[in-house]
Amino acid sequence: MPAEEASINLIKDINIGGVSSNPQNLTNINGTLYFIAIDSSSGSELWKSDGTEAGTARVKDIFSGTGSSNPQNLTNVNDTLYFVATDSSGGRELWKSDGSEAGTVRVKDIFSGTGSSNPQNLTNVNGTLYFVATDSSGGNELWKSDGTEAGTVRVKDIFSGTGSSNPQNLTNVDGTLYFSATDSSGGRELWKSDGSEAGTVRVKDIFSGTGSSNPQNLTNVNGTLYFVATDSSGGNELWKSDGTETGTVRVKDIFSGTGSSNPQNLTNINGTLYFSAIDSSGGNELWKSDGTEAGTVRVQDIFSGTGSSYPQNLTNVDGTLYFSAIDSSGGRELWKSDGTEAGTVRVKDIFSGTGSSYANSLTNVNGTLYFVATDSSGGNELWKSDGTETGTVRVKDIFSGTDSSNPNSLTNVNGTLYFRATDSSSGSELWKSDGTEAGTVRVKDINTATLSSEPYFLTNVNDTLYFRATDSSSGSELWKSDGTEAGTVRVKDIFSGTGSSNPQNLTNVNDTLYFSATDSSGGRELWKSDGSESGTIYVKDIFSGTGSSDPNFLTNVNGTLYFVATDSIGGRELWQSDGTETGTVRVKDIFSGTGSSNPQNLTNVNDTLYFSATDSSGGRELWKSDGSESGTIYVKDIFSGTGSSDPNFLTNVNGTLYFVATDSIGGRELWQSDGTETGTVRVKDIFSGTGSSNPQNLTNINGILYFSATDNSGDNELWKSDGTETGTVRVKDIFSGIGSSNPQNLTNVNGTLYFSAYDSSAGNELWKSDGTQTGTVRVKDIFSGTGSSNLQNLSNVNGTLYFSATDSSGGNELWKSDGSEAGTVCVQDIFSGTGSSYPNNLTYINGKLYFFADNGNTGQELFKLDLNSTPTNELDDGTGNDALFSDTENDVLTDGTGRDSFTLTYPPTGGYDIVADFTVGDDTIFVSKAEFGLGQSQDTTLDSGLFRLGTSATTAGDRFIYDQTTGNLYFDKDGVGSAAQVQIAQFSNQAVLSSANITVIA
């Protein structure tokens, strides 16, 4: 961080909703839960948990860095975890893990090199892993593995050659693997394997010839395989097999004839098969089978008549079948069955009346059924049932109120239920439950980052910052800020509730903010605000009713607002407003009737509005307006006839309008206008002939126009013009020879032009120019070598250039420059390390530079750099083990390498201190027992009861309050008493602090 620079601070974490780690594939391996999750420092990786916060950790960053290995298909084989993942050196392959980082390894690179074998359908058959994969010599076939590279082999090339048999539905039946596959002689049929090539055979050609029986829903019932298949004489029906051709038979033609009963949800309950099916007399209902035709019967016609109950989620809980179904009196609810018609009953009407609770994710945990459901008073939450109506209750309202926690991936690990859920303070994270409300808790907030409010359209109105942002309680709305957390508030919830008004085109006209927005009663219209809720109002419903006038190109011309809008009787035309409904009128129907002139590029030149538009007689040309209908006229038909000159990049240079246009005799070139037809002329044919120089980035520097353009050499370089043909010249061939420097981001800083450009020795970097060839130089090679710093957001802030850029050691951060190489420095590494904060929308107001950025913890939020607050000391420890003391106000204490200490003082004599780059585990915070009035012994770690994570004290004993989302550390001398807490420090990297990091000294 540069010397003499105030620190950058997060103003407010507007959207405090949590980012989700999205735990998936929850799998029990010998009492340890394994799963997939995403944290803030890496991508989707393998995690494990013993049910405690400390014991919930990432197993290995397989695809190191922010990349994702995306593990899937987690499978337990003799207490070893097998799964599929991708690392940075190869493709998607088979991996295994014993729970340690060192023991998490790739089993074999089946498709050698960067190709992927894409293992799928991982299945444990008596301690051998079977799966489907592709290698470089053949198609997608059956493989097996004993966990070693040598023991990971293809079982058989069923579809010989490069064809694929694509095995599916792998199922273990008493040590024999059954599956469906396709060979070269027929369709998809039933196969089995004992693990040898010779023992991998087709069981039966059920649909004889080249047709396919498509076996599905393979299910083991006491050593007999049940499945669903189609033969040539009937539809899709229930079958069974003992592994022989003769023993593979249809159980029953439930939907007699060629119709299909389409059995689904096959489930074994104590040796009886339950499933859903359709017969010719009724709808889709619950059935059961003992394997005989006579013993295959409908259990109950739950939705009587021809209606369907559609049984789903069939689950065995100690011999009782639970499922969800629909009857004629209500919605989809929880049911149970003992296999008899009388014993098949609805357990409870959870969402009373005709509504549906949509019971799903049914899971047996030691004889108690857990599931997810919705009732009429709350959202989608966790429930449990003992099979009785009174014993069917919601476990906990995790996301309190009518919102939903949406539990998912319910998994039993030794009697504890684990699942994924969302509460009001975090995203979708790992939870556990013992069946009680108190025992249903979040295991760990794995991804501690918060959602982004995505501030945008930062606009200064009378020294108050206005912007658009999104919070967790409403949608995208209008906000304002005075630079403090308390003073950063939503102005009005225009589209009430969670809907979004999406304010756009924020424009200051005489200290009133104008913008476009959408409310719940109509379309997108013109609004204005004085900063109060009551003073934020609709100006006019231009397109009456629910239609949208969609105001755009809002432009201030001497206190009158001009804009483009559509009404219900005409097309898209030029409008003006004085802020009243009656004073908001269409200026002129340029394209008369229902046609649209579509004005664009509205530009104020000495209180005359210039713009481009299309009328009924010609193409898009240059127009001007004094606000009256008669004074809104065509300046010149540059491309004569019906063609379009399409003027754009309209720029005011000391009262002369410069722009880019095309005429009928040449290409796209630089033009100027004094507002008259004769005074509207091409400045110079830079790319002579019919070619186009395509000028861009037009910028006024002390009355001289600078821009980028291409001449007949084909190179795009920096040009300037004084308005004459001879005075329009290339400033410098920055990328000498063949090649273009492509100047962009042209910015005026006190008469010096700054811009980004390429040269032949470096990438895209910062340049400056005084208008001469020798004075056009690269300021600094920020990303050294041929890499590019990719500058953006160049802004003049009180004579200093601020911008965003990337160097070779870190991410995209905020920089500043005084025009010298030494004075071009990174202001602060907001997203510490190699991450990028991506500063944007730089806006200066009264000594403060506002922008939005991402510090890695809070998402994209509003930040400020207080240029009026310069620290009296900046202490940088460099290297070694150093001690840094805060003895004056507004100190910046910067950690280097080594084990360092930071001594904080109380009471502060001025502003709080900045602690930059604090390293947890290496560095220590010292606080004085005497200064802070602490009762514990000196030279001891701070009592954990004195330390509180959050924004304020919650008990009388709280003294040190740390808000990790902002890095702010407060001291409160009486906890929840009347004394106000005082900020004593800010940790700029939002370090993860606890009481263990603070030591009490004398």
Image: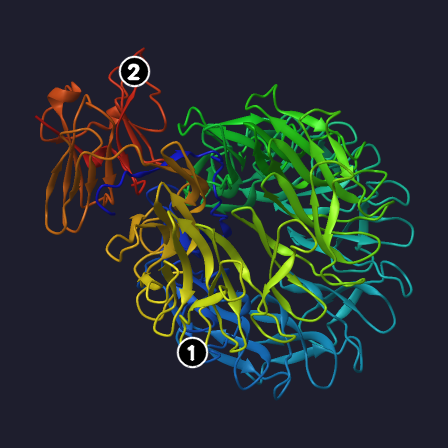
Closer to us: 276 or 152: 152
Residue 984 place in picture, x, y as percent: 24, 27
Which kind of residue does numbered mark 1 sit on? Gly
Do labels 2 and 1 touch, CB within 8 Å?
no
Residue 625, labelled with which disc?
none
- Quarter holding residue 671: bottom right
Residue 151, labelled with which disc?
1
In the image: residue 706, left or right of residue 8: right
Q: Quadrant of the C terminus?
A: top left
- Quarter holding residue 95: bottom left
Question: Which residue is at the far top?
Answer: 978
Question: Which residue is at the far bottom?
Answer: 161
Closer to us: 11 or 286: 11
Q: How far is disc 2 from disc 1 in space, using C-alphas?
A: 64 Å
**Residue shown at the point (56%, 30%) measured from the top left:** 473
Colour mapping used in the image: rainbow
Q: Nearer the viewer, mark 2 or mark 1?
A: 2
Closer to us: 77 or 373: 373
In the image: residue 913, left or right of residue 414: left
Residue matched to label 2: 956
Which kind of residue does numbered mark 2 sit on? Ala
In the image: residue 438, left or right of residue 953: right
Residue 717 place in picture, x, y as percent: 47, 68
